[in-house]
Amino acid sequence: MKKVFVVTAAIALLFMACDKNKRASKRLMRPGTWKVVELSVDGEHLSPLPDWQIDECSIYDEVCTATWELDTTTSRFHWQFNDKAERFTISRVVDTADCEDFYTQEVEQQTFKFSGDYKVLTSKRKFKELESYSTLGYEGEKVLIRLEWE
């Protein structure tokens, strides 16, 4: 009887742990539309502001992707939390089909220039605040991104 209880408890813990990972990943970055409410470089606010369409993702099992939307144009990027969710990384997806648009579309320039590692200043369910001094386009300058979930 004691053996059956121990095995049942172990199986229950295993299922709870898996479920907790999925919930944690959704808590860090909910899938759906995130509005960029501030995008600034050394205090200068940039516009127009993009939206991020975050795809469904399990941060422990796959590379997470999203779409950077600016007016009617889009660019894909990878994102990832590291260091116990204290660091956030953005990396533009380089697709050969997008290369010819790189110099003519602002959205492609933004995903490239803002790619880098960010310190997570605030991470709430519907609000994120990210800061970086090491982006590809603004090395050494303070980049601030504030996001709100729709």
Image (cartoon, rainbow, N blue to C red):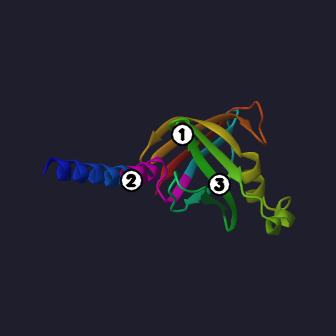
In the picture, the disc for residue 129 is 1
**Foreground of the two, 16 or 1:** 1
Distance of label 3 from label 2 (alpha carbons): 23 Å
Q: At numbered mark 3, what does the secondary structure look like: helix, strand or loop?
A: strand
- Whether residue 21 is in magenta: the answer is yes
Q: Write the residue at 47% across / 45% down.
A: 127
What secondary structure is marked by label 1? strand
Magenta residues span 20-35
Rounded to the nearest angstrom, the CA distance separating label 1 from label 3 is: 18 Å
Which of the two marks, 1 or 3, is nearer to us in this view?
3
The structure residue drawn at horizontal position 50% and vertical position 56%, both measured from the top left corner, is: 58
Residue that label 3 marks: 78
Quickly name the residue at label 2.
Answer: 18
Q: Amino acid at mark 1?
A: Glu
Helix, strand or loop under label 2 = helix
- Return the residue found at the far top: 140
Observer able to see residue 14: yes
Left or right, 52 with reference to 123:
right
Q: Position of residue 34 (x, y in %)?
A: 52, 55
Around disc 3, counting alpha carbons within 10 Å, would you say few (fewer than 14), some (14 to 19), or many (20 or more)? some
Query: Residue sitting at 71 percent across and 46 percent down?
Result: 115
Question: x, y percentage for residue 94?
Answer: 77, 59
Question: Disc 2 marks which amino acid?
Answer: Cys
Q: Position of residue 140 (x, y in %)?
A: 76, 30
Q: Quadrant of residue 64?
A: bottom right
